[in-house]
Amino acid sequence: ELLGGLHGPVRDRLQLKTPEEFNFLNQSGVYELLDTDGMPMCDEVAEFARVEKSMAQMQIDEAQQGQVWEILGAILHLGNIGFETQEIKGSDEGSTVTTPDVLETAAGLLQVPAETLGQGLCFSLVKITGETSLIQVPQ
């Protein structure tokens, strides 16, 4: 419904694409619900308008709704971040981001620096007997 119902500058700012272009949505190959006659079972634009109206009735203002759309958009973009194995001298293998543009988009929507998000996705902090170590996460 988000991809079908959100239009204009907000959609552009979130850099939303078609469902086929998001890894979290394209795994099944099903992009709309159809009845047995092949007709759409719901109008996604109308359903999204109902969601917005319901949120407004619950006193969720437009700014807060925008934050919800930013988080959902960021989640979709996070699924498109690519990783590759990185050899680490004297240690097991780790991973590195291969799609910095997608990382930038997700980070921007989450309002965090891309470097911080990348480190959070590729590294883990391990605390052993009071010492904290930064360990690269395997792919």
Image (cartoon, rainbow, N blue to C red):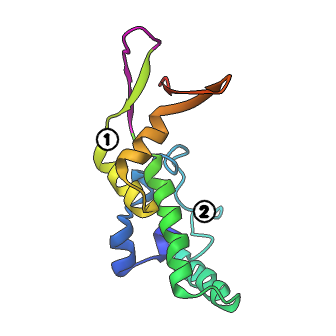
Q: Quadrant of residue 1?
A: bottom right
Image vertical order of residue 44 relative to residue 133, above or below: below
Judged from this view, the residue extending furthest toward the right is 58
Q: Which amino acid, mark 1?
A: Thr
Q: Image check: 120 left or right of 56?
A: left
Q: Which of marks 1 and 2 is in front?
A: 1
Question: Horizontal and vertical percent for residue 80?
Answer: 41, 45
Q: Image check: 115 left or right of 49?
A: left
Q: What number is the disc on residue 61?
A: none
Q: Which residue is drawn at 48% across and 55% down?
A: 76
Q: Which residue is drawn at 48% across and 39% down?
A: 121
Question: Horizontal and vertical percent for residue 9?
Answer: 34, 79
Q: Nearer the viewer, residue 31 or 54?
A: 54
Q: Point out the stretch of residues depicted in magenta.
A: 82-92
Question: Is residue 67 shown in magenta?
Answer: no
Is residue 80 in view? no
Q: Which amino acid, mark 2?
A: Leu
Image vertical order of residue 63 relative to residue 37, above or below: below
Question: Horizontal and vertical percent for residue 119?
Answer: 43, 39
Check disc 1 and report the residue beneath it: 99
Which secondary structure, mark 2?
loop
Q: Quadrant of residue 58?
A: bottom right
Question: Is residue 86 shown in magenta?
Answer: yes
Q: Which residue is drawn at 64% across and 64% down?
A: 35
Which secondary structure, mark 1?
loop
Is residue 16 in view? yes
Judged from this view, the residue extending furthest toward the front is 130
Q: Residue at x 55, y 45 (%)?
A: 28
Image vertical order of residue 57 relative to residue 122, above or below: below
Q: What number is the disc on residue 33?
A: 2
